[in-house]
Amino acid sequence: MNDPVFIDGAWVLPFVQGGKGVGASNGRSAGAWAAENALGTFSGTGAAIGYDSRGVEISYPHSGRLRQDRHEELVAWSIEGGILQAGIAHAAAAGKGRIRVNFLKMAGGTLRTMAGVLAGTRLPEGGNMIHAVTMGAGLPGEEEAEICQREGVYLDPIISSVMALKVLLKRNFKKWSGQFSTLIGAVVYEDPWLAGGHNGITSREDADSPQSPYERVRALRNCMNENGMQQVAIIMAGGVWYLREFEHWLGDPDIGPIAFQFGSRDLLTQECPISDAWKALILSMKEGDIALNKFSPTGFHSSAYKNAMIENLYGNIQRQVPFATKASEAMPCQVQGSAVPGNGFHVAEADSASVARWIAAGFNTPLRTPDDTLIFVTPERAREIREHRSDCVGCLATCALSAWSQDADKRFVTGKRPDPRAYCIRKSLVGAIQGEDLQQQLIFTGHKAFQAGSDPFYRGADGDIFIPTVKQFVARLATGN
């Protein structure tokens, strides 16, 4: 279970820390993994610039009047935070293992942030504090490859299907031809039906019909072999709890060099910066508590804990009807209510009774969606959505909730109507990492997290909760458990 594998230029244990995002992994936790000759990964998206006296991550102090001003602040602080966390990880690793930084392609200013962090972490004696960049929520392109080549670090794409790898290789074939095995230190296969956070389910795949990870990884290996990457390791991510469940993958020529990534289990370590309440929540989860949904403002599917926030988003979908701004034979019934705009909305007769019932229950504020539908929310929720839009800092390349775009040529807007069915990902993730009410925050977690409650490793002799150090956890992994 612990035979070394060659990844990102070194022989390391086949155990990989999931990168996650916005503070759920940092320099301290990544350095602890690397110190065990494993692969530590910290988030370069929203990396912390500091901590308060309680050890809680400090929010970026935005002050810009315009969204584009706040976006520039975001990029600057993300670079500062990434350099800080890389330094912490480098010091903790003491020359062992590998340090990786995880970026989301869809995050705002990712290319600039990545370039700034890597340039700021060069070592005086040559090389870099960071050994590899991992990138998901979108495929890296030639610009990312050029930055990594210039800084002497590997680029490890996160993909969810063999089709995604084929697209990546075709898109970059001219630039990368003959260099795949030297530029790419590993390919991370993130199973779209098992992993937490954003998932790469395509329009050709059915979100309700999971496919075999083994068959998908085998197809991935075949494609890699055809492109000269026989010795490049695959990192299996998503649904990995006990390594003994993957024992038959080891030494399988159809799978080839393989390592395993731990995202949810990494949360249950002492070095992980999430709150004790969040760790206790994971230990209380039951099977089915994780929802694969499409509420993310990125447009990607994602997997998150079904708390009050997620349930409310499902409620929005249930309180949704087509509408027209003028009465017609198809939509003759005018929506009545104090929060209805003066020009009014009209709905089908079949929907009229439902609308009246929602309004009577307090969901009396209709909000238009880009799909020519109305959702009905409480006045409090409508105010919150307006606040989230006005406070937007451009944390995504494009955002469905605020209609922000980082493209100046498009005047920093997507050109689409803002979608009130999405959530503010920045406020929800930062709120979670800062220990606010976890029922109202975004808790990205893998679908196997429920196994924590029955895993004896997390219980002491007296039955109390036991949270291991990374050192203890890595030792446990080597046993297959």
Image: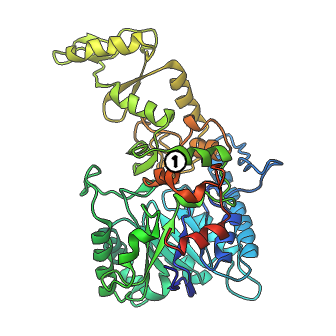
Residue at the far right in the pictured view: 53
Q: Is residue 241 above or below residue 8?
A: above
Determine the residue positioned at 68% across, 76% down: 35
Whether residue 75 sits left or right of residue 169 in the image: it is right
Please provide percent x and percent y for residue 66. Answer: 63, 41
Relative side of 385 to 318, left or right: right
**Where 118 sits versus 63, above or below?**
below
384 relative to 264, above or below: above
Q: Identify the residue shown where x is 41% and y is 46%.
A: 287
Which residue is the site of mark 1? Answer: 412
In this rendering, position of residue 471 left or right of residue 215: right
- The residue type indicated by label 1 comes to Phe
Q: Name the quadrant containing residue 348.
A: top left
Q: Position of residue 463 (x, y in %)?
A: 63, 49
The residue under the point 42% across, 89% down is: 231
Q: Nearer the viewer, residue 48 or 54?
A: 54
Q: Is residue 128 visible?
A: yes
Write the residue at 33% across / 28% down. Answer: 318
Looking at the image, residue 291 sits to the left or right of residue 58; the answer is left
Query: Dot 1 lies on which element?
Result: loop
The image shows residue 54 at horizontal and vertical percentages of: 80, 47
Q: Position of residue 85 (x, y in %)?
A: 71, 65
Rendered image quadrant of residue 435: top right
